[in-house]
């Protein structure tokens, strides 16, 4: 039985709740279908747990922005919590709303900013990494290559520079293993076995496929343990080289005052940022290059604008985006279509609250169907097709509709948005300036259907790379 005045939804079965109403492999279509029957705010039971699904801009804004604090909690008893928070630290992504989350979020935002302002700016770091990407692509001129490892490692290296002050070669075994753990766990974390783990608690200790996620998490914990142990030995207090050193300085400063900073937190937190900074940006890039090859006229129009704006300059800077309305529109359209984190990260209510006339008790799980906003009819000129016109007005100027929400909204909104946007712009522009990307003739039609997970991933594909004949650099 649903509580009084709770959002409506399909009938609930004992034990399973509404599991049979969802495809456990990929429930995105079911979430859209259910909103047609029950409206933009409805409820389903994942096993015994009541969850409210938010669809469309209006509901999303009221919950995440207008009543942001009421909706900014995180559930604490899910599969993902057991996998990620095993060493006692809760990190930031899964931390519940409260002082520890607030302090850690503030600290990361400040540290990311400081590393962007220091001797070497964030732009310089991204450009350094792009040189390695270019080398990989130059080695494939005239051939085809699968860009997956290249983009995942590039994104991983950029965040690694900030976190640990180091990068890894693209064929380094250690980072290959870590990135594999991240990408596998991003698929397991909201796959069928995670749903079963969350719905039927007595099966949690059985040797079922969800065990793989725990193994992966252990590998990542060992890796971060080694790094932190090394940095503790080599650091000079007060002269931080990277995020880990900054945290260790802060830990010393706050020692014994009951603060939420701890070594266990540092480990989970660093892994949170490494994971969040890798699997998101790289999957967006993969989607982007897939569409740029499938829509060669869009690629060419970007290249014309890039050539024109960068004429005589040796490299692009983030500021140049303001002179590139078409490229900006294309990058935003890529993010809209990529829908990289389709259900955001699950929230929960921090107190008894109301949403569009419904009563929602404290502790209710909230699932944001970001997909429903990024493709909402009435919000977009072309909701169901790839079309940069979605972000251009009649004068060809860049405009950003309110429904552009791939980073979510409100107090829990992605804290890496600035970094991600800078990476997407600098990487895409630099590569499009230098290379032409072609869908291989023998590859059949491009398949745009993504593989479902916490992050959506394009199916593996190959690209043909040519040096552009008319280069201005
Ligand atoms: C295209 C790239 C990215 C996309 C689409 C994306 C999207 C998201 C989304 C939808 C959320 C959940 C927000 C919510 O719960 O309401 C999130 C949270 C988060 N993201 Fe990102 N993200 C991206 C890149 C990054 C990067 C590069 C970093 C690394 C610095 C990062 C760090 C985080 C963190 C730490 C959180 C948790 C914030 C919190 O709980 O307070 N993300 N991101």
Image: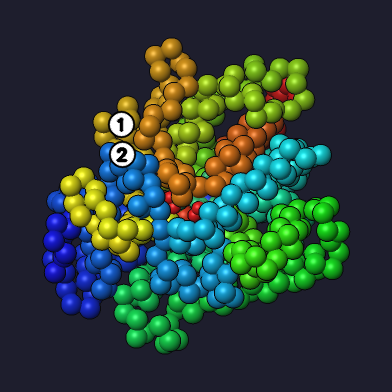
Q: Residue at the spot x=34%, y=86% of the render?
A: 202
Q: Residues within 10 Å of mark 1 (few under 14, many from 20)?
A: some
Residue drawn at x 53%, y 54% as measured from the top left: 102
Q: Secondary structure at mark 1?
A: loop
Whether residue 172 sits left or right of residue 184 in the image: it is right
Check disc 2: other Cα within 10 Å, few if <14, some if 14-19, many if 20+. Answer: many
Which numbered marker is on residue 57? Answer: 2
Q: CA distance from mark 1 to mark 2?
A: 8 Å
- The spot of residue 443 in percent (x, y) is 50, 47
- The numbered dot on residue 462 is none
Q: Nearer the viewer, residue 86 or 435?
A: 86
Q: Position of residue 386 (x, y in %)?
A: 40, 34
Q: In the displayed structure, would residue 355 be above or below residue 397? A: below
**Left or right side of 182 for 136:** right
Disc sitting over residue 379 in the figure? 1
- Secondary structure at numbered mark 2: helix
List x then y, in percent, for residue 139: 74, 45
Q: Which residue is depicted at the point 41% across and 24% down?
A: 389
Can residue 177 be seen here? The reply is no
N-term mark: 1 or 2: 2
Residue 260, compared with residue 432, is above or below; it is: below
Compared to residue 309, the image places residue 257 above or below, namely below
Q: Nearer the viewer, mark 1 or mark 2?
A: 2
């Amino acid at each position: 039985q649903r509580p009084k005045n709770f959002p409506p939804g399909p009938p609930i079965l004992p034990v399973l709740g509404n599991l049979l109403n969802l495809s456990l492999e990929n429930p995105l279509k079911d979430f859209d279908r259910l909103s047609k029957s029950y409206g933009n705010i409805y409820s389903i039971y994942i096993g015994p747990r009541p969850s409210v699904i938010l669809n469309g801009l209006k509901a999303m804004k009221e919950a995440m922005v207008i009543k942001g604090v009421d909706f900014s909690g995180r559930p604490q008893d899910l599969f993902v919590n057991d996998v990620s928070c095993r060493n006692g630290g809760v990190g930031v992504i899964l931390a519940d709303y409260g002082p520890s989350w607030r302090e850690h979020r503030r600290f990361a935002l400040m540290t990311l900013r400081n590393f962007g302002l220091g001797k070497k700016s964030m732009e310089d770091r991204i450009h350094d990494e792009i040189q390695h990407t270019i080398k990989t692509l130059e080695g494939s001129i005239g051939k085809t290559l699968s860009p997956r490892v290249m983009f995942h490692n590039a994104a991983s290296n950029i965040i690694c520079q900030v976190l640990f002050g180091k990068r890894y070669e693209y064929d380094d075994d250690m980072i290959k293993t870590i990135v594999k753990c991240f990408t596998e766990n991003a698929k397991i974390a909201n796959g069928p076995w995670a749903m079963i783990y969350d719905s039927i608690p007595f099966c949690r200790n059985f040797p079922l496929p969800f065990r793989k996620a725990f193994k992966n998490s252990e590998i990542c914990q060992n890796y971060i343990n080694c790094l932190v142990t090394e940095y503790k030995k080599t650091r000079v207090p007060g002269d931080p080289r990277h995020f880990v050193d900054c945290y260790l300085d802060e830990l010393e400063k706050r020692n014994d005052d009951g603060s939420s900073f701890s070594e266990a937190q540092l480990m989970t937190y660093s892994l949170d940022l490494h994971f969040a900074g890798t699997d998101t940006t790289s999957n967006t890039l993969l989607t982007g290059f897939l569409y740029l090859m499938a829509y060669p006229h869009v690629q060419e129009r970007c290249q014309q604008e890039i050539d024109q704006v960068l004429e005589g300059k040796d490299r692009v800077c983030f500021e140049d985006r303001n002179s590139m309305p078409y490229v900006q529109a294309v990058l935003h359209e890529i993010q809209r279509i990529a829908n990289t984190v389709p259900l955001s990260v699950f929230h929960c209510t921090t107190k008894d609250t109301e949403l569009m006339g419904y009563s929602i008790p404290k502790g209710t799980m909230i699932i944001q169907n970001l997909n429903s906003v990024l493709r909402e009819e009435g919000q977009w000129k072309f909701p169901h097709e790839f079309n940069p016109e979605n972000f251009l007005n009649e004068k060809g100027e860049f405009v950003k509709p309110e429904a552009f929400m791939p980073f979510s909204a409100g107090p829990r909104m992605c804290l890496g948005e600035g970094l991600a946007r800078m990476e997407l712009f600098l990487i895409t522009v630099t590569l499009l300036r230098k290379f032409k990307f072609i869908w291989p003739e023998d590859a059949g039609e491009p398949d745009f259907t993504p593989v479902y997970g916490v992050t959506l991933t394009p199916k593996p594909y190959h690209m043909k790379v040519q040096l552009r004949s008319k280069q201005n650099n």
